[in-house]
Structure formats: structure tokens, C-alpha cells
Amino acid sequence: MLFHPTDSRSAGSIESRRVVVTGCGLATALGNTWEANALGFREGRSAFRGVRRFPVDRQRVKIAGEVDLPEEFPFPGVSERDLHRTDHGAKMLLWAGEQCMAQAGWSKGSEAPLVFGTTSGGMLLGQDYYRNAIAPTSSRRKQSERSIYYQAQRQVTLLKQAHGLIGSTLVIANACASGANAIGLAWQLVRFGQAERALCGGYDALCELVFAGFDSLQALSPTVCRPFDEHRDGLALGEGAAVFAIETLAGAKARGARILGEICGYAAGTDCHHLTQPHPCGLAAVDTMTRACAVAGLSPGEIQYVNAHGTGTPMNDASETEAINCWAGNTVGDLRVSSTKASVGHLLGAAGAVEVAVCLMALQGQWLPPTRTCRKPDPACRFGLITEPQAASLNHVITNSFGFGGANASLVLGGAG
Amino acid sequence: MKHVVVSGMGAVSPAGWGVHALLDAVTAGHRLEETFQERPHREPVGVRIVPEPSAEILNRLRHPRLRRVSPISRYVVWAAREALDEAKETLNSPTARIGTVFCTTSGCVSYSRRFYQETLDDPSLASPLVFPETVFNAPASHLAAVLGNRAENYTFAGDAGTVLQGLALAGQLLLRGELDGCLLVAAEERDWLIGDAFRSFSKSIPVAEGAGALYLTLSEGAKFRLNKVTDPFFYGADTTRESAVVSMARQLDPGHEGEGAMLLDGVTGSSRLDRPELSAWRDWTGTRRSVKTVLGEGFAAGAMWQIVAGVSALRTGEVHRAVVSLPGSYQFAIGAEFAI
């Protein structure tokens, strides 16, 4: 049961357990494997191109970080009919899930709740539905299936069924913090004993509605996305998915699983300042970073690297810079910070999840992913902004995700050792 | 021993603004008046809409963040405030940690449709004021801003049963001591697009709009408590809707012990849609209320109306157990029980 009276008996006496990552699959514009992404992020490659998925001739901005999946790929657990009915977002999710499950080595029938974040789930199908609904002579033949497969919960359920997992599915739609929130909530389920394992992450596909939305806000960079650059002028959109298998450290060790890293802390909060703009001082960001570190039992001085939300918009990066400066205090000079959105774009509901993967790669490889498009760091940055590839000695890192509506989340990650 | 309890409730429904209006309509059991919304190139779709708010209600909803919002955000704020008012929770304590879990099936659909139409017409003229209101968590964000609440705030999108997943999560957060209180809110808004999509499942059941809210806290001496939330039983290749509903009913109420209990079922009035649930609960001997037959298919909001009706029956002493059965439209069946 999801909730039972016996839960009440343990109120106030719940012990926490260490939780590790034993599987990760991802798809971004840099590639569709861990290795391709690790190489790309380590070098700080940019993977943008002219948008091919929908017409952008009347949009102000015309580039994004698109993901090309193989034309054909096997999903043994998904029927041809289901696969045919899904959209690109769901396919990226299934692709990342397939890699993740292969790496984790979980068997079919494993009990594992699924917790995923997305901002617009199956919006590509939603758009198809709407265009058909308003067309004077359209057929309604596929409208029913579009209305079902459009639902993000359906897409996550397909992933669950593909791998024979047993457990609930939960879809978090906390805007651009969704992926981080999903990993944080799944981590809590395992940490506090409500599950031994969980599959979690985030995904989002580029779609016309969202692209036009960010363009209408003039949030997209008409030049080059340059997070934390003094002359930054906006973000670049991307798409992608990242899926993680997480389980207790004890469980992973008992079955001899390869550990990719540890999730050590998580906190979420709300910035009430504005629907789309962060508080200028980043108060909620300071709060979530501070609390996530406290949960992990770490001080800011024990964090070597921040994977910033770092969208490249003037307001986000100014606010986050203030927040990082404030949170790190007198240790800020030793801190290294970068935004990997310069490489693949802002992946919205997938951003927090893909950035957790980048952190795990950095911890594993002991390197720092650069923001190479940043030519002249904003003088407000009192931390070390990584603009060139470099090796590092990393024990713990933190990743930030902030979304519309003031959704803020921070995750603290540690190495496999 | 501390238990998860309902300290306050709120509702906005086609019956009116407030819990009393909802309960009066459900108790009376008469189907509310249906209105019809135009849709392109086809006959209008039946909907049950929330009545226009009174001047007093509008006055209470005055806030800078609510100036341009679509109806769903107003419903969310009203229902949440009603629940907090009943619980006398002012959120004035600087140390209080009051979380929010917001659940919705369709979300801010009216602005999403409008913005996408603007994009199709000419993306360079699409409104930057409308786009931010299309995100699923916009209503929960507005609520946080109105209340000045900086605590955790989660928006869950999914089938109606997502509300009970949210209820379980809220209960766990409270029991772990991470929150002092938690608002669980669910809401939907009307749009012809929702009615159009739902016609794939039923041509006779009108969709409904509104919201419901619970303010949940921990208590040692409360009269009744959240007793259980079942597992979600998913529909899929190996599991029919029928068998999922039976599994849920078995886990929720193995002995069908209906004496002194009320079943708040998800029966809609459509024989095809209702068949699995009617079959699963055919041996139920207690009292029974079918909120949807009165109000229509309210998706996540409708799930919350079922809970509000059940908790109200416990409060008045009408029953000592309230069983909520939620066979969702698309994804899974799930249930919950509140009991003395």
C-alpha cells in the first residue's frame, strides 16, 4: 500500500539509508550514450543546429539542441502498436530507460516505483490532437489514442511495463525543476524505506508551443547561449531524457552492482517573487542549496563544484550568481561553477536529470565540464567559472534546478567511493 | 501515536463556491444543470461549469498574481484558502513548514489551447503574458505567492487517482517530520478541448470543472484519520480495467464491511464506464454516494470532491468509515480509507 496505518507507528523515528545510482541512460543533442555525452560535456562541445522538428521560419530564433534517435531500435518490452502511438519524447524516455536498465542489471519483476519529471510530456501528440480537432474535415480516428498517449503518466507507464517493473508511477510537472524534483522524491522514497529501489529522471521533447513560448518571452538567445557571460542574452532550448536506477547502498553492494555515485542530499523550495522571474538575490536558491547540504551533512566548503541552473538569461544568472556567492560565503573563491546548458541547451523537465548525469560523469572522471561559450565572465561571479576543460579532484558536487513558478531544487551528489 | 488528519477542507464545484454548496448538491443527489460549449465544426460538448463568483468571492480573490490567471488558478486559491481558514492556519509563523501538493489531469488547458492557436496563427505575435500560464505548476505557484509560502510545492500530473498518490506522499512527508502541515489541492478548468477528448470515452457524461483542497496535519487525539491508500493498479496489456478495479477494491476493503461505512465511488452514470466498479463493489452493504453522477467527470478535482464528501460524512457522525474508490479514466485504479 502507498499509505498504511503502520506508517504512523514510525512517525518521528524513521531512519535514513544511503542511496546510490547503479544505472544511468540518457539522450541529448551530444549523443545517445553515456560515453558520447561524457566526451561532449568534458570538452564543452556545443550541439545546436537549425530546428528540423517543426517550422521556425516565423520565429525570432531558429536553433536548438535536437536529439536524433536511431531510426530503428529494439524495445523488447514495448509492443509495436504502443511504440507507433508514442511521440519523440516518450521514445527518448524509453531509449534512456533501456540503457539505464541494462546498466543496472535489474531483473524483470523488480519492485521499483517510477518518479519522472516533465514539463510538457506528450505535447507533440497534444499539438496533433488540437490541429485535428480544429480542422473542418479531419478524421477522429486517432484522436482517442492521442488523448491517452499524450498523458505523461501513460508514457512513464510504458517504460514501467517495458521492463516489467512493479510499483507506482508519479509524474512531477514542476516546470524546469521537474527532473531534479523527481530524483529528489525518488531518493526520499528509497532513503526512508518506502522502496528498496526506484527508477527516476526527467524527459522533454522540443515542441512548437514551448519553443514559441520562450521566444515570445524573448528568453531565447538570438546569438549564442553564454551562461554567466557579462554579455549573455538568453537561453537555447534543447531536448532530452535521463533515467536513473537508484537503490540502497547496502542492496547495491549485496548484489555486487557497479556504483556510479551517491545521492547525498536534496531540498526543494518555492520562490514567490514572480511567475517567470527569480528573486534578484536568489533567496529560495540559497535556501535549497543550504538545506540540501545540511541533509547531506556537508558545509558549502566541502562542495567542490556547482552545476548551475545557468540558463544564460540575464536575470537567472544574476540571481543564481548572488545565491551561490551568498551560500558559499567565504569559501566561494575555492568553488568551481559551470553551466552545461551551453552544450545541449535548456532541456526543461529533463534539465535537472541530465545535469545529475553530468555531475556523476564529472565525479567518476574527476573533471569539470566547461561553459566554453562564456568569453567574459560576469564580474559578479566571485567563484571560479569553468570555461575550459580541466581535471579536478571532486568528492561532492551540487546541482541546481529552477523553474517557472519559483520551483527550486538542489541535489548533492558524491562519488562512487 | 500521531496520525494524519484532515484539519480543513475547501471546494469549488459546479454546485458553487465552498464545501457547503458541494455537500448540499451531493446530498440532494440531483444532477446539476449542464451547459454546452461550442467547439469547431462539431456539435457543442456538455460541461458542468462553476457558477460566476459573487462580488464577495471576487474581493477575496484580489491579488496581483491573480489578475491574468485562467479560472483554474482562482479555483485552487479559493479551495486552499477555505481549507486553511477552517483549520485556522494563518501561515504567519516564520518557522512553519506548510507544503503544497497540487494534482491535475488537464492543467491550464484554456491558456495552453489559446497560446498554441496564437502560435499557429503567427508565433511572432503569440502573447508572452499567456505562455507562462500554460505550465502545469502555474496554479500552485500562484497559490504559494498569494499565501507567501516558500515551502516545498509539488505539482503532479496524471489520472484522477494521482490525488490519492499525492495524499500518500503528503502523509509520508508529515510523518517524517519534514512538514508541519500540507495542502493537498486538485483542480481542473473547463475548455471545449477537454470535453472533445472525453467524448472518446463517453458521449453522455459531461466534464466538470472546479477544485478541492484538504489541509492535512498530524494529530494524536483526532476523531478520525487517514487510514490507508492502496497501491495503484495500472491498466495495461496484462491487466484489464476490470481486474485493476477488483484488485483495488480487495486491498481497500477485503471483507466489504459496509456497516456504518460509506463508499464514495467513481460511478458516472455511464453503464459502460461504470461496469467494472459496479461489479467490484456489488456486495457493498453500506451507504453509497456517487459524486460524479451529480457533478460530472471532474478528473482530479472530482477525486477531491469524493474525498471531501467522505470526510464530511465522518465529521457529522453519519458513518465511522469513508471508503474512496477511484477507477481512473485512463491509467489506474486506486482507493483510500478514512476512519474513526
Image: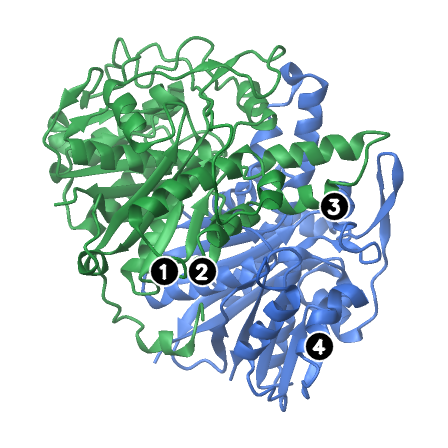
Chain colours: A green, B blue
Give SS at disc 4: helix
For badge 4, the amino acid type reads Ser
CB under 8 Å between discs 1 and 2: yes
Mark 4 vs mark 1, CA separation in Å: 39 Å
Q: Earlier in the sequence, mark 2 or mark 3?
A: 2
Look at discs 2 and 3 and give the one toward the viewer.
Answer: 3
Give SS at disc 2: strand
Q: Earlier in the sequence, mark 4 or mark 1?
A: 1
Q: Chain of mark 4?
A: B
Task: Give left or right: position of B320 versus A390.
Answer: right
Look at discs 4 and 2 and give the one toward the viewer.
Answer: 4
Q: Is residue B105 above or below residue A178?
A: below
Q: Earlier in the sequence, mark 3 or mark 1?
A: 1
Q: Chain of mark 2?
A: B
Identify the residue at image location x=23%, y=33%: A361
- Find disc 1 in the rendering and name its residue: B179
For badge 3, the amino acid type reads Ala
CB under 8 Å between discs 4 and 1: no
- Find disc 4 in the rendering and name its residue: B279
